[in-house]
Image (cartoon, grey):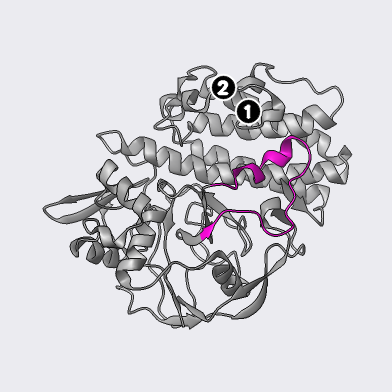
Amino acid sequence: MGKSRTAPSQIDLITRYREVRALSEALAAPLSDADATVQSMADASPAKWHLAHASWFFETFVLRDHVPGYTPFDARYTFLFNSYYEAEGPRHARPMRGMLTRPSLKDVRAYRAHVDKALVTALPMLKPEVQALVLLGLNHEQQHQELMLTDIQHLLSLNPLEPALFDAPNALPAPIPGPLHWIEGRQGLVEVGDDGKGDFAFDCEGPRHKAVLHPHALAHRLITNGEWIDFIEDGGYARTSHWLSDGWAWVQAEGIEAPLYWKRNEQGWTRYGLDGRKPVNRAAPVTHISLYEADAYAHWAGFRLPTEAEWESAALNIAPTSGNQLDGAACPRARAAEGGSVLTQMFGDVWEWTGSAYRPHPGFRAAEGAVGEYNGKFMSGQFVLKGGSCATPRGHVRASYRNFFYPHQRWQFTGLRLAKDL
């Protein structure tokens, strides 16, 4: 669940609602019905399902529960588009979402329009605590906007044609970043976690609490594709000494030799993105790597991954709206770092793996009811990522934000920043 402290005005909330919903539609605009229906793996969902599920959230937790006389668009959608809310009853199996050839993409868009009309009409009459649910739903939809992009990328990468969904603007070659600079972090007792001062935070970001930091430093920028190629050429994927046991077993079982979407030809390494297959930009941050790969690289380089508290304490005074993030229906891609000896790329470009398990902060309590299932029940076996990516809608993340994935997953825009002990 999310926490909203200062409810926006009704006009502001309606404006924000329309903007978020419009971005989802714009991201899906280039898709055919077939593009939006197919599911490439169990971890991903069809674009059509993302669009419908976000509307299901508003219809279920706001319109159904708090707007007397609301008429559902189609009662069967309750079963089709519930994700994991046990309190809402049975649901269509996640690995089978790609079998939903009906409803059509046109029907899903009609569903969204139905929900939009009812919610915008009802907003002025909603109590503040219900408007807080609307704000939660908007942040929830922003999460699905990023998932929709990464899921589409994975789907299209399996097509031998490797089609481009978006046209990438022409870009001048970026200079290769210079050597890493090390920025000393805070040490001793620090406060991290949601401080309750922002307009919104998910429940798993709090409560605010103290953490002990030992002397350490963070690299001033992300690791680049060029540095990752050095790792590959030095046998990084072939030497068991760099890898965690589970990571080495994963590399062997899956035949992993490079980041996801990379291929090597006579001209060198290429990568697939939403702008099609392009040569790997050696200056750009490496992305689509697992926690296992990030940890192996850090071991190979002689350093380690930062902890969640180290990263968060370093980002507290950096504007979360900075960096390369999603500003509209464009092709997301990580970009090269600018020069300098201060922390850069803390927000945007790639989600940064930390070495911290996704577990509750001290004092965490999940909310009652179905919305309490939002984050807390997933606090097992996953690792925290920080900072957002080039596919994260701008304004969605903050220093306390906690993304989380299993250590083998890498279809998201995931990369790494190194840390070291002092």
Pick whichever, 310 or 339, lies toward us: 310
Whether residue 370 appears in magenta in the rendering, the answer is yes
Pick whichever, 171 or 77, lies toward us: 77
Q: Residue at x 25, y 34 (%)?
A: 160
Q: Is residue 353 above or below residue 38?
A: below
Q: Earlier in the sequence, mark 1 or mark 2?
A: 1
- Marks 1/2 in contact by CB < 8 Å: the verdict is yes
The magenta span reads 356-380
Identify the image quadrant of residue 314.
Answer: bottom right
Question: Seen in the image, is 126 located left or right of residue 27?
Answer: right
Per the picture, the main secondary structure of the magenta-coloured stretch is loop
Instruction: Give coordinates of residue 78: x percent, y percent.
Output: 66, 22
In the rendered structure, find residue 229 and report the number of the disc placed on it.
none
Pick whichever, 207 or 178, lies toward us: 207
Q: Is residue 315 above or below residue 275?
A: below
Q: Mark 2 points at which residue?
A: 92
Q: Name the residue under label 1.
A: 82
